[in-house]
Amino acid sequence: MPTHRLQVARNSLARGVCQAPYSVSAIKLRWHLHWLPVRQRIIYKVAIITSKTTSAKTAAYLSDTIHNYYHPASTLRSADKLLLTVPRMSLALSAKAFSVSVPSVWNSLSSNYRSAKLLSTYKRTLKTKLFDIAYSQHEHSS
């Protein structure tokens, strides 16, 4: 798993920042530092880049790789949900491409996140959601 090594490095960094011994749980340290685990951090960054690209069209090279919003041929309930079109892929490795992973992450978010007007609100609420998902199964004491 490619993210495992990054997570191990991030755990070591959390211990260094908190000056904690190796015996202390890295999950607890990351929770106190308000750090997302690597997987959720990747989802967060991809979602932020997608939001900036779809709303402001700031980066032309990125907006060229993201396909337009999904427009079904017939009237469907999903037509107004601001979903992105996921391109067809011929290889399993293609699923990791930016043009494929962006619509997948974007479409997995609820419509409240996709239709957010302010970027600052979007960032805060998305990080809170991902933080809650990451640490919901762990009990933490102050």
Image (spheres, rainbow, N blue to C red):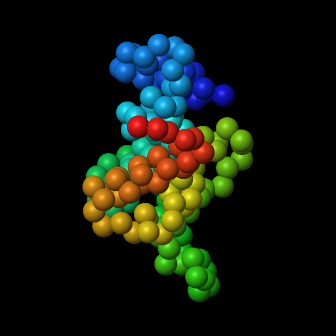
Asked whether residue 59 is in view, the answer is yes
- Residue 137 picture quarter: top right
Q: Is residue 14 above or below residue 84?
A: above
Q: Position of residue 117 (x, y in %)?
A: 30, 67
Q: Position of residue 17 (x, y in %)?
A: 35, 20
- Residue 107 picture quarter: bottom right
The C terminus lies in which quarter of the figure? top left
Q: Residue at x 44, y 69 (%)?
A: 112
Q: Residue furthest front?
A: 141
Q: Is residue 56 above or below residue 130?
A: below
Q: Is residue 71 left or right of residue 60?
A: right
Could you say which is closer to the camera, residue 19 or residue 75?
Answer: 19
Q: Residue furthest bottom?
A: 75
Q: Is residue 33 left or right of residue 129?
A: left
Q: Is residue 29 left or right of residue 1?
A: left
How many numbered marks appear? 0
Q: Residue at x 27, y 55 (%)?
A: 120
The N terminus lies in which quarter of the figure? top right
Asked whether residue 51 is in view, the answer is no
Could you say which is closer to the camera, residue 115 or residue 13?
Answer: 13
Q: Is residue 64 above or below residue 115?
A: above
Q: Position of residue 42 (x, y in %)?
A: 49, 40
Could you say which is closer to the camera, residue 141 or residue 46?
Answer: 141
Q: Residue furthest right?
A: 91
Q: Residue at x 47, y 13 (%)?
A: 21
Q: Residue at x 51, y 60 (%)?
A: 109
